[in-house]
Amino acid sequence: MAIVEAPDTGSEQLALTTGDAMASPADSLGVFQRPQGDTGWQSWLFTVDHKRIGIMYGATALFFFLIGGIEALIIRTQLAAPDQEIISADLYNQVFTMHGVTMVFLVVMPIGAAFMNYLMPLQIGARDVAFPRLNAFSFWCFFFGGVFFNSSWFLGGGADGGWFAYAPNTSVIFSPSHGMDFYAIGLQITGIASLVGAINLITTAINMRAPGMSLMKMPVFTWMSLVTQFLLLFAMPVISVALFLLTFDRIFDANFFNVAAGADPLLWEHLFWVFGHPEVYIMILPAFGIVSETLPVFSRKPIFGYEFIVFSGIAIGFMGWGVWAHHMFASGIGPISVAAFAVSTMFIAVPTGVKILNWMATMWGGKLSFTTPMLFSIGLVTMFTIGGLSGVSHSIAPADTQQTDTYYIVAHFHYVLFGGALFGFVGGFYFWWPKAFGHMLREGLGKAHFWIMLIGFNLTFGPQHILGLQGMPRRTHSYFDGYGFNFWNLVSTIGAFLIALSFLVFFANIFVSRRDAKKPGWISPGPDPWDARALEWMTASPTPSHNFDHQPVVTHRDEFWYRKYGETDDHELVRIASAEEVAHTGERTDVHLPAPSYWPIVLCLSFPLIGYGLIFNLGFAFVGGMITLMALYGLALEPVDDPDAVHGPDEHGSGDGDAVAVGAGPEEEASS
Amino acid sequence: MSRFTTARARLFGLVAIVGLAASACASNAQQTTLEPKGPSADKINNLSNLTFLIAGVVFVVVEFGVLFVAWKFRRRDDDDDSVPEQIHGHTRAEIGWTVLPAVILAFLAVATVGTILDLADEPEDAVQIRVVGQQWWWSYDYDIDGDGVHADGDVNQPGIENPDEYETDIEVATEMVIPVGTPVYLDIESRDVIHSFWIPALNGKKDAVPGRTHHLTLEADEPGTYVGQCTEYCGLSHAYMRMSVRALPKDEYDAWVEDQLAEAAAPSSDLAIQGEEVFGTLCASCHLIEGTNDEYDGATQVSGAAPNLTHFASRGSYAGGIFELWNDVDGDGAVETEEIGAEFNDNQLEAWLRNPAAEKPLAPNASRGNEFGRGMPDLGLNEAQIDALVAYLIGLE
């Protein structure tokens, strides 16, 4: 098959093919039948398809990115010149807190989740994640947690204690609005999403790999996702405990952090950073995974030092637990503690440096094409290096006592999280867009996006290194004339608006490219527009709901690439098959898929109700609790898939309910 | 074409960054970390410079390395579409670039640990000052008689067993005065939330955590005023919680101590006498002026404290260090020691007394869970009262 025809609409192509897989009422235990249909809004609300959930994670995160971005522009407008009070100190404190929390918990983490949900099952040749309904539950938890948190803007004001929420400044006496209540409960809800998602994706990666895909044949992105999920599995309980303590303190006067009652505020700092530092790696490792996929494709070479890339990721995952107190060098912990954490922090730079050098070696000797995803990936390597080096300067604890809580830190972590994670994610959007939606994003606009963003980013955060070293503290709503802060703040503000412009280009690109794909005469890029390497490119584009027409059998790392290229007799690598010959057509419709479910969204809808109840009136919490109970019963008792629904021929004896079995079709014939 | 742009733009970016770094030492950056003026800050700066040097070399090598590789291995226009050699790795190279950074970092680690332990030492024969942070100003209690007990007007401070032990030493606000060339050993505490004490020219920062006492050593090599501000986010007016250290030659410092130990000056004019009466009826419930309202048991504030005003007019600034009490006579943008007492900045003080919350973000009213305010309330003073108070306060030299 040569070139795939254009889909009429994206949603139809993405649709579930199990519309007829409904239970007959006589067999069902639950009150309601499973939802059915593969088009329209219901097919999104009740979906359990990992790809739709991934897309919803991405779309929701981009929406929150707009909110967080507007908050960033408000911050930069206020700080454009000295002595400005365009917004009050009170509002500024809310805006910077909401900006930080939004970007960390509602943008970077869920964009990572979007990629992991969409790609992990595809990269390991699976039909879905291990627990599809739990996957939907995770997404809706995140969604309603984020909406709940942001609803504070309309209910008395946002959180004003900083994303780090140091006690006792977050107690009711010092933060009397309900903002911090929304923070504590909202993050608790999104935390459930991360924790459940971690269990789901760890199980998926460990149990659901296609035959032949040993752990050391897994694509690097899946490896980094697996490490990330383990970090989440152990980090989320810590912040959950801390947030419960804060919630009980604020709502029930529990006195966990009340100094007058004998509490030590350093307890919160430790709890927060025991979570908070692994959190940094939770945010960056998926992006490391993304560039480890894109750099080889656009260098036309395999990843250099696969084992070292993988094990350095694992090493970061372990060492990430031993460095948290480097956020507390000025907090008054003793000199031996400071020295120990300084040294451990320095050495976490080693596995990170190994990754950077392996990426360089991946490009070495290749044939590099500077497509948009490649530009963003090189952007990550170069920009993250700056953030990594400023990170080393923080690990020098005495130097950090000059740098901490200044703009030098703001510069550092934006080079890591924007220059690192976000550059990787945006590159990932451009790279996998055709896989998810069947059409490319325009390259010209993509490159414009990259260059404007690169320049804007460096103008915004580069000067903040200088501001910090000149002594400008962070989290200040204004600054005085006469401290040498004026010029670089203005530059930084101009840069911030350039970043905003670059994302306008991005959103325009999404719109324009989508319109292009609907024009008559548009030619589909096919399943493999980049001559890629990993298994996800073997599915049709956009990926059909059943993923693979039949289960692939894996013999190589970069399995897909080795089906396209083989060795001649004199050991020369040559193309032996076109992508279209190797890739699946996506036409098969008899793969057994888990049925959609009403209950994940209903269950998650009850959590914000409990939250509003705790804050405003316990009556709501009672209603919310009742809905929780009802939804749990609904989940437990809803009818399983109709056993008579259409299946692949070798299907039975394996999965039912949520436990999707690995087998999705007949063993395929070896293709090369 | 894009590959040319790639390389050129990146080169430009690098040049720009180096240029930025070079211009970091702006002459008007009075709060900079890059110009140490005392031994502790010097030690930190030496270590920072070493780190920046190493990081700078790594930066140039890696960034130019990436650009070079991207340039050298770009796909040419005449590419024959053959597959480049599929290199999967090189174990010796991997071991090399794992060990090399580890060795560099081990070198830095030795220097770092040494400096950490060095800076943690308590100096001998140091001036002992207790630094207390509260929303949104700093107070300094000097243990002048060396009995280990600091002066403190605030006897409601948790942990104080016997208020009678707090004989009068010196208690000042916002501006710390220290002798040049003598180490000053700080006990840093907080009365409400976490703050952080930071004078970048003299040392790194140290958090003031309620319920704990942390220590920091300051020493200034030369006379001068060294500014800083609170660097742990402490709520509403965090940006306006400033402080400074005024280092004086030893003899001037001794004279300053002598002056501060005295009780407040008696009002010298009719207006000032009226001002003292206003103070007694409206201000004395929170502020202490020794010799005027010694019957004092803490401010009606969440922190339980308000600045001691006994020698108010000897200071350069007030309200958390954000307003100058004296005009900048020579117009150089800073009020130096010589300018204190020269030309009184009466407009600002009047505005402050008229309605403090209009001049600085404060939360002076009771709120949820809290019967007290945070920050100076609007006392509803009329203009005559304000004039009288100003006349009284400016006489408190």
Image: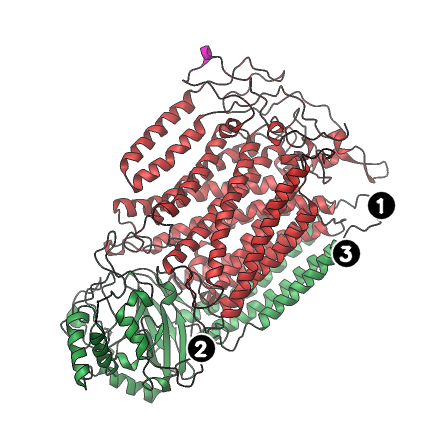
Chain colours: A red, B green
What residue does disc 1 label?
B80
Q: Label 2: few (<14), some or many (≥20) within 10 Å?
A: many
Provide the residue span drawn in magenta: A23-31
Q: Are marks 2 and 1 in contact (CB under 8 Å)?
A: no
Residue A403 percent across, percent down from the top left: 47, 65
* Chain for numbered disc 3: B
Res. A427 in view: yes
Rendered view: B341 above or below A128 = below
Which quadrant of the figure has residue A440? top right
Q: Label 3: few (<14), some or many (≥20) within 10 Å?
A: some
Residue A520 percent across, percent down from the top left: 72, 33
Which type of secondary structure does the marked residue at label 2 adopt?
helix
What residue does disc 3 label?
B72
- Of label 3 and label 1, which has the lower sequence position? 3
Q: Label 1: few (<14), some or many (≥20) within 10 Å?
A: few
* The stretch drawn in magenta includes residue A384: no
Alpha carbon distance from label 2 to label 3: 49 Å
Judged by depth in the image, the label closer to the viewer, 2 or 1, is 1
Between A584 and A34, the one nearer to me in the picture:
A34
Which type of secondary structure does the marked residue at label 1 adopt?
loop
- Residue most toward the left? B295
What residue does disc 2 label?
B39
Res. A304 in view: no
Type of the residue with mark 1:
Asp
Type of the residue with mark 2:
Pro
Left or right of A252? Residue B66 is: right
